[in-house]
Image (cartoon, rainbow, N blue to C red):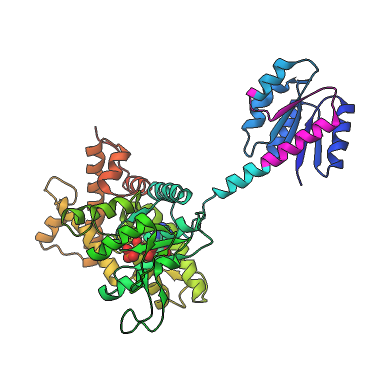
Amino acid sequence: MPHILIVDDEPMVAMLLSETVSQEGWLPVCVHTLADAREIIGAQSFDVVLLDIQLPDGSGLDALSFFVGVTAAPEVLIMTGYGHPDAAGLALEHGAWDYVEKPINIKKIILSIRRALEFRQAKMAGKKRHILKRNGIVGASQAIGECLEQMAEAADGDHSVLLSGETGTGKELFARAIHLNSQRAESNFVVVDCTALSETLIESSLFGHVKGAFTDAGRDRDGLIKLAHRGTLFLDEIGELPLEIQKKFLRVLEEKKFRPVGSTTEVKSDFRLISATNRNLDEMVTSGDFRNDLLYRVKAQKIVLPPLRNRREDIPELVSHYLSRICRRMDIEPKTVHPEFLQCLCDYEWPGNVRELVNVLDQVVCSTRAIPALFHKHLPLEIRSAVIRRQAGVAGASAPSSSEPGAELFTALKDQKMLTWQDFRKQVLETVEKTYFERLLATTDGDIGQMVKIADMSKSRIYGLISKHDLTVKK
Ligand SMILES: Nc1ncnc2c1ncn2[C@@H]1O[C@H](COP(=O)(O)OP(=O)(O)OP(=O)(O)O)[C@@H](O)[C@H]1O
C-alpha cells in the first residue's frame, strides 16, 4: 500500500488531505514542521510527499533537495500559494514531481498523486530489472567487481561475448549469469563443449542432420544451434573448432541461418553467442589456426576473468561458501576452520583456480566427515608442500648475506648447530618473511599500491604481516 507523507502546518488542510488520501486506500502520515518531516523520512520510507512551501521552521522549497536526495527518494508534490509561478517552476527544476496550487483542488491533487505513483512503480520495476542475479558468483575483490560490471553490461545487450581466462576461473559460470540476466533468460542456454566433439560429429552436432545423411542417421535431428533459438549458445573452448567448421560457423553468425547435414533447405536460429577460451586467440590468428574474421565476430565484448592467485582476498569467502555447501550436500554438520588452514589456502598458487579449490575442499570434507574443526594438517600434502616450496622460493630469492636477518640461521646450519627440522623451518620462514617485508617496505617506501603489485598479495594480508613483524619504513 502506498505511503504518503503530508507536510503542512495548517491543521484543517492536513486533515482534509489525510482523509482524501485514506479514501483512496493509501496510508497518510501528517507532520506540521520540516524538522518532523526530516525525522520521519529518516526512519520510514514514503512513496509521495505533499510538501507545503511555507512552514514554521523554513521553506519547503529549500528543503526539497533533502527529500529528493534520500535513499529510495519519494516523489514530491509541492503545494504553492496561488499565483506563485516562480516557486512552482523552481520546485520542478529542483526535482519535484509536480506542484498544486492552494487552495487545494481535491480532484487535481488525487490525479497528480496517482500519476506520481504510477511513475514510481515503473521506475522501481526498471531498477529491479537491473539488480544482478549473481548465479553463485562469489567474491568481493575489485577484480571480480569489475567482471560483474562487465557481465551486467553484457546482459543488457545482445552482442557476442568472449570470456577468456585460465581453466577453472568461472567462464561457464559467468556465461550462465549473462544468460540468466538477459532478455533471453526464459529460453535455452545451450552448452557446446568444442573439446568433447569429435571432428566427424561436430558438424551434425552443431547444425543437425536429416534422415539418411550418413550411415547412423536413422531420423532427422535438430542441432545445438537450432536448440539455442531465442536463447544463448555457449561455445566452450571455441579455439578448438576445426578451421572448416569455423568457416561454416562464421556464415551462421552473419546470416543466422544454416543447412543441416544432408539437407537442401536452410534453417533459421535466432541465438546469442557467448564463447569461452583459455587459449590466446590472437596468437592463434597469427599462426593461422583461428580465423580473424570469426574472432572479430565473436568478441564484440571481451571479459577477462582473473586467476584466483590474483584475487586471494576472495579465498576466505569462497572457502566458507563451498564448505557449507559441501557439508549440506553430504548431510553433515558445518565445520569450523582454523586460521592456519585458511592461511595455507590463501598462500597456495591455485593453477586450477576455483575448480581446484572446490575439489580440494570436497576432498578435505570427505576425509574429515566426523571431525568438526579443520586444521592445516587436514589439507592434502601436495597443497601444504607446494606452499612450503613457494615460501622457500621466496627464501631463496632473498638468500641471506651475512649482514641480513636470516643469515645466522644458515650459518647455524653450516656450523652444524642442528635444530629439529620443524623448528629450523619455522624460524627460517619467520625470518625470511620478516626480511621480505622489510625489503618490500624499503623498496616501495611504504606505498601499499606498489607493495600489492610486487608481492601479488592482498592489502589486508600485507598489513597483517607488517604488523605481525612490527615493521616500519626505514628512512
Ligand atoms: N567466482 C566464482 N564464485 C564461485 N564459484 C566459482 C567462481 N568461479 C568459478 N567457480 C566454480 O569453479 C568451478 C569451475 O568453474 P567454470 O566451469 O565456470 O570454469 P571455466 O573457466 O569454465 O573452466 P574451464 O576453462 O576448465 O572450462 C565451478 O564449480 C564454478 O561454480
In the image shown, does 377 or 363 lie closer to the viewer?
363
Quick check: 127 above or below 97? Answer: below
Q: Position of residue 344 (x, y in %)?
A: 33, 61
- Asked if residue 96 is among those painted magenta in the image, a careful observer would answer yes
With 68 as the anchor, is 363 left or right in this view? Answer: left
Q: Is residue 40 visible?
A: no
In the image shown, does 112 or 143 lie closer to the viewer?
112
Q: Position of residue 453 (x, y in %)?
A: 28, 44
Q: Magenta stretch?
A: 93-120
In the image shown, does 449 or 471 lie closer to the viewer?
449
* Residue 171 image-quadrant placement: bottom left
Residue at 54% x, 48% y: name it.
130
With 101 as the anchor, is 362 left or right in this view? Answer: left
* Residue 270 image-quadrant placement: bottom left
Q: Is residue 389 visible?
A: yes
Q: Residue furthest toward the front?
A: 264
Q: Position of residue 107 (x, y in %)?
A: 84, 32
With 424 as the anchor, is 98 left or right in this view? Answer: right
Quick check: 460 above or below 344? Answer: above
Q: Position of residue 214 (x, y in %)?
A: 31, 81
